[in-house]
Amino acid sequence: RFGKLLHLLEVIGLYRGVNSAGWHQIRCPWVRRHTDRAETGTALAEPSAENNWRGGFKCHHGHCSELNMCDMWAFVEEFNKRINRKKS
């Protein structure tokens, strides 16, 4: 499932690559909330025992500090709904 998330983020232009710590750097889906609209400072961690196999979401911008992987999955679901509506 996490691999599909990364693939979708790559397809829609949000995936940036993996950093030296193994986090997947992305453009924050909520970048419009950032005061300066900075596109750096957001990353995803792969599911592991360290995060109870849930994965991790971290945005270092104050307006997104409360967001987590549940919000990331909700973004993906909403994105998919919009795509499916456009296809109909």
Image (tube, grey):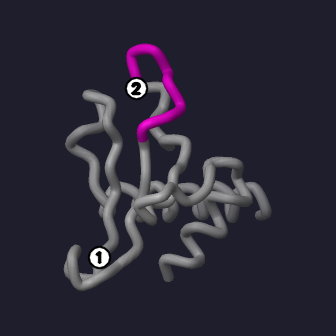
Relative to residue 28, is residue 3 depicted above or below? Answer: below
Q: Residue 37: x, y in percent?
A: 49, 21
Q: Secondary structure at mark 2?
A: helix
Q: Pick whichever of labels 2 and 1 is earlier in the sequence.
A: 2
Q: Secondary structure at mark 1?
A: loop
From the image, tell me which residue sits under label 1: 54
Q: Residue 79: x, y in percent?
A: 58, 56
Give the amino acid type for the residue marked by disc 2 in the picture: Arg
Magenta span of residues: 34-41
Q: Residue at x 59, y 76 (%)?
A: 4
Label 2 crowding class (10 Å Cα cut-off): few <14, some 14-19, many 20+?
A: some
- Quarter of the image where the C terminus is located: bottom right
Q: Is residue 47 magenta?
A: no
Q: Residue at x 53, y 31 (%)?
A: 39
Q: Main secondary structure of the magenta part?
A: loop
Q: Residue at x 61, y 56 (%)?
A: 17
Label 1 crowding class (10 Å Cα cut-off): few <14, some 14-19, many 20+?
A: some
Q: Nearer the viewer, mark 2 or mark 1?
A: 1
Q: Residue 47: x, y in percent?
A: 35, 78
Relative to residue 47, is residue 22 depicted above or below? Answer: above
Left or right: 17 with respect to 23?
right
Relative to residue 54, is residue 45 depicted above or below? Answer: above
Question: How much space separates mark 2 and mark 1, taking CA atoms?
Answer: 25 Å
Left or right: 13 with respect to 51?
right
Please identify the residue farthest to the top as the structure is shown: 36
Viewer-proximal residue, 72 or 54? Answer: 54
From the image, tell me which residue sits under label 2: 33
Relative to residue 84, is residue 34 depicted above or below? Answer: above
Q: Residue 1: x, y in percent?
A: 50, 82
Give the amino acid type for the residue marked by disc 1 in the picture: Arg
